[in-house]
Image (spheres, grey):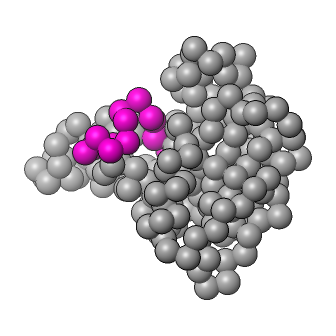
Amino acid sequence: MQKPEINVVVFSGGSAPNSEHIALAEQLGLELAKNNIGIINGGGGGLMEHVAKSAHGAGGHVIGVHFEFEGQGKSKYNSKTISFSVLQDRQKKILELGELYVALPGGLGTLYEVIDVMSLKYVGTIPGERKLVLLGKKYWGNFESLIDSMVSSGYAKSKIKDLYQTVDTVGELLSVIRAGNSTKNVGS
């Protein structure tokens, strides 16, 4: 296994109740692995495991940054697992390891991760060139409506819309990754 060109953090659900989202997670893992892009994720089950299994099957590199919480198991498809018992410590580590952040569908943990990245980008703790990409326009539509409502109501500045972008397909995501890492010749 060669060293990945870049590492992408993939936030996603610890469960997998939707076959469409499972297919998207598996395609994401496969395409990232095929393009020599390392994956950092929560290291557990659900959509996280679908991403890891697909990447593992294609020879990809997956680092699971696992939070030990109420029986959350570790994925056997991680190339390496780092475990934490404090959520904030785990979050800090996962953000340090990534050069780009991608959010698949998920629940409260995924929402926490997305909001954390947006907040840290807003205050400059995470450099602006580190993109946050929400994958799946249908799923993330209500989130975008909430952001629009915050802006139109005067509770947030319109620049918060620049803290993330939404794409619908893995192909569109790969284009974003390539554009942001053109000097590294990623996925060509």
* Quadrant in which the C terminus appears: top right
The picture places residue 176, in percent across and down from the top left corner, at: 54, 26
**Residue at screen point 77% across, 65% down:** 75
Q: Residue 11, located in which quarter of the rendered image?
A: bottom right
**Residue at screen point 53% across, 49% down:** 103
The picture places residue 154, in percent across and down from the top left corner, at: 11, 50
107 in relation to 116, above or below: below
**Residue at screen point 23% across, 52% down:** 149
**Residue at screen point 31% across, 51% down:** 119
125 in relation to 21, above or below: above
The picture places residue 132, in percent across and down from the top left corner, at: 46, 41
| Foreground pick, 136 / 187 | 187
Can residue 71 be seen by looking at this rendering?
yes
| Foreground pick, 164 / 39 | 39
98 in relation to 35, above or below: below
Q: Is residue 179 left or right of residue 6?
A: left
Can residue 102 be seen by looking at this rendering?
no
Q: Which residues are magenta?
A: 121-137
Whether residue 161 appears in magenta in the rendering, the answer is: no
The mark tally for this picture is 0
Residue farthest bottom in this picture: 70
Whether residue 132 appears in magenta in the rendering, the answer is: yes
The picture places residue 59, in percent across and down from the top left corner, at: 87, 41
* Quadrant in which the N terminus appears: top right
